Image (cartoon, rainbow, N blue to C red):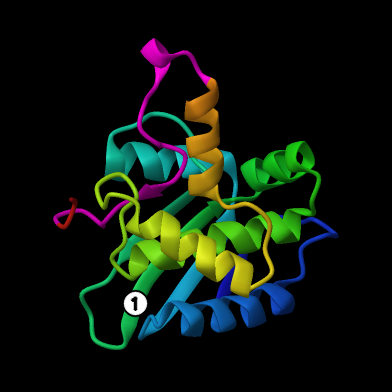
Amino acid sequence: MIILEHEDEDIREQALALFAGKARRAVRLRGDVNIRITSSREMRELNRRFRKQNKPTDVLSFPSSLPKWAGDIAISAEIAASNAAQLGHSTATELKILILHGLLHLAGYDHETDRGEMRARETKLRQQLKLPVGLIERAHAAVEERPVRAQRPCKSAATSKPEGRQK
């Protein structure tokens, strides 16, 4: 289910819902997923509450321990639009990239700790789903372009669990 809280003529709720279903099957994720496309302001609040980081982020995933419920994904429409403009594709395409990334987190992948497994899986699925470069690849490219002393692990996307179940 897509919950669209941000108006943009480039964003079609039905098309995103169809993509999310297709991507969920490709990821082999069991259970339903809610995807909330919201403001950077709300993303800042969620990031502060669940990750103790007082800044907006592009995507957050909230895995569920309930049967038949995979979890929830929150996405910043503003960050998606900004990234899309910088990368030369549509906001809808960027939202699809973020949905795929969030679904992989719900499936248990964690690019900050898994030694490249999520990156490889995201790359394969992104190609299968005909999407341009993904979040992890972008983050790694940005790190590789920095001087050695400034390198940091990827922090562009986050996985978070609701209170009491944080990693």
Amino acid type at circle 1 is Ala
**Numbered disc total:** 1
Is 164 above or below relative to 40?
below
Residue at image position (30%, 66%) is: 63
Taking the image as shown, residue 97 lies to the left or right of residue 159, namely right
Residue at image position (36%, 61%) is: 105
Residue identified by numbered label 1:
70
Q: Tell me which corner region of the image, top left, top right, bottom left or bottom right, holds residue 15.
A: bottom right
Residue at image position (78%, 41%) is: 85
User: x and y percent of residue 52 in the render?
Assistant: 28, 34
The range drawn in magenta is 146-164
Of residues 72 and 25, the one nearer the viewer is 25
Determine if residue 74 is in view: yes
Taking the image as shown, residue 127 lies to the left or right of residue 27, namely right
- Which structural element holds mark 1? strand
Is 7 above or below relative to 153?
below
